[in-house]
Amino acid sequence: MRRTGFRGLAAVALLLPSVTGAQAPAAASPVVLIDGMAVDLLAPQPGVRIESPDLSVNMDARAGRLIRRPLESPPPSAPEQEQAQKHFARATEYLRQPDALKASLEIRDGLTYAPDDPRLLSLAAMVASQMRDLDAAANYFRRFLEQDPANLQHTAAFVAVLLRLSRMDEADRVLSAGEALSPDFMPFRFHRACLQLAADRFRSDRAYWTQRPFDEIVAATQWLHADRVDLAKIVGASGYERLVAEILGPKAPSGLDRIHAALESAASARASQKWSAGIKGLREASALGASGYGIRTALAEALENGGDRAAAIAEWRAILGEHPALAQGWVSFGHVLLRSARFDEALPVIRHAKELAPEEAVIDFLLASSLALSGKTADAQALYAELVNRRPRDLRRWIESDAVFEAALDQLPNKTAILRRLDVPPEME
């Protein structure tokens, strides 16, 4: 089968949104894209991604069950809609320059034509936040969430604004509503820790933070570093150090600046596939006291992509020693072993992942692949047949995501029948 690639959702909600680098909605994604406040469909990058979205355990829950509908709300009339769109387009163009003041004027004019347009309200809230007009930002966020109450990113940003306004009771109510939708959404946990520290009722949740993936730890570190003044005002100087220790580890507060620089360097190296630089940054951050699953898995990823698979596998074994109950770790390690052609070792690892998360279809897929590559084609065929009926779209995407899964499918005598069921034409085999 020719691999056509795959696309996955990636979402990051900033503690307080920035409006630099705004862009207009793309055809594939109609939402407003403002730095970390938007959800975009990202094209895949070559190379190994330890936690690729297509092989994440219970992705919907881990990503916060991001319930987003297109932010389209028709204005009262077609001419007003056209005028509102023109102001919206001009506002996003000003933000590219960047000129937040002119953008805010365009947004204000656009709202006179379409006062309930979620796109304009979203942009208005983020621009007001960036300009530190927090009362206006709170008003815009509130109006936006009246129309899209399940939007987790905007809920998190609204809570950040309320914290800065010292509206603690309101922040608690808004946050509680968000937590009811997605209790494990990382920005909500960050804000909850802030509220607890501000009220002197802090309850450590270090186990949660030690299991965050790399991108979430990088985002949280950026907030801790960039927003230290605001955070210290909210939770106090000692509370701020406690927050750093909670998220990054007990030895991290004294080295936060260097940890931030090291993780930024590692993230940049990861994006540009400069694996030796990534390894250096990750090891430096660890030596300075930053700890947890995400940092170690990023190191394992860099080691594997850098050509040292033996070191990567050793790192994964150490990770599972620290996080034996984390199904995602076993899934990712099983995938690494399959890529390394260590099929007999992969099979018990994936079986253990199945014990930890018996309802996850992606683990059934990994198990089927492992069985096929280990020569147990009859057992593999039974699992493939079940997945063809239960998750046909996911099955095709998973197969196309890595050459090792195509190799597994090649072992099955009924491969052609499976491909026809997945709507793969003969010319694409």
Image (cartoon, grey):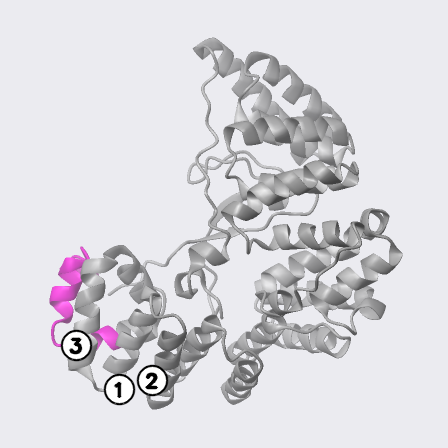
Residue annotated with mark 3: 412
- Dot 3 falls on a residue whose secondary structure is loop
- Number of the front mark, 2 or 3: 2
Residue annotated with mark 1: 374
Q: Report crowding for label 1: few under 14, some 14 to 19, many 20 or more residues within 10 A (C-alpha).
A: some
Q: Earlier in the sequence, mark 1 or mark 3?
A: 1
Q: Residue 34, how many percent across, how many down?
A: 61, 39
Vertical side of 294 occupied by 136: above or below: above
Q: Nearer the viewer, residue 238 or 263?
A: 238
Image quadrant in which you'd find residue 306: bottom right
Residue annotated with mark 2: 347
Q: Quadrant of the C terminus?
A: bottom left
Query: Is residue 419 within the magenta segment?
Result: yes
Q: Nearer the viewer, residue 180 or 140?
A: 180
Task: Indicate the amino acid at tag 3.
Answer: Leu
Task: Indicate the amino acid at tag 2.
Answer: Leu
Q: Residue 92, how many percent across, how many down?
A: 61, 30
Cα–Cα gap, marks 2 and 3: 17 Å
Would residue 111 appear left or right of 45 to someone viewing this image? right
Magenta segment boundaries in residue numbering: 408-429
Q: Report crowding for label 2: few under 14, some 14 to 19, many 20 or more residues within 10 A (C-alpha).
A: many
Image quadrant in which you'd find residue 167: top right
Vertical side of 373 occupied by 84: above or below: above
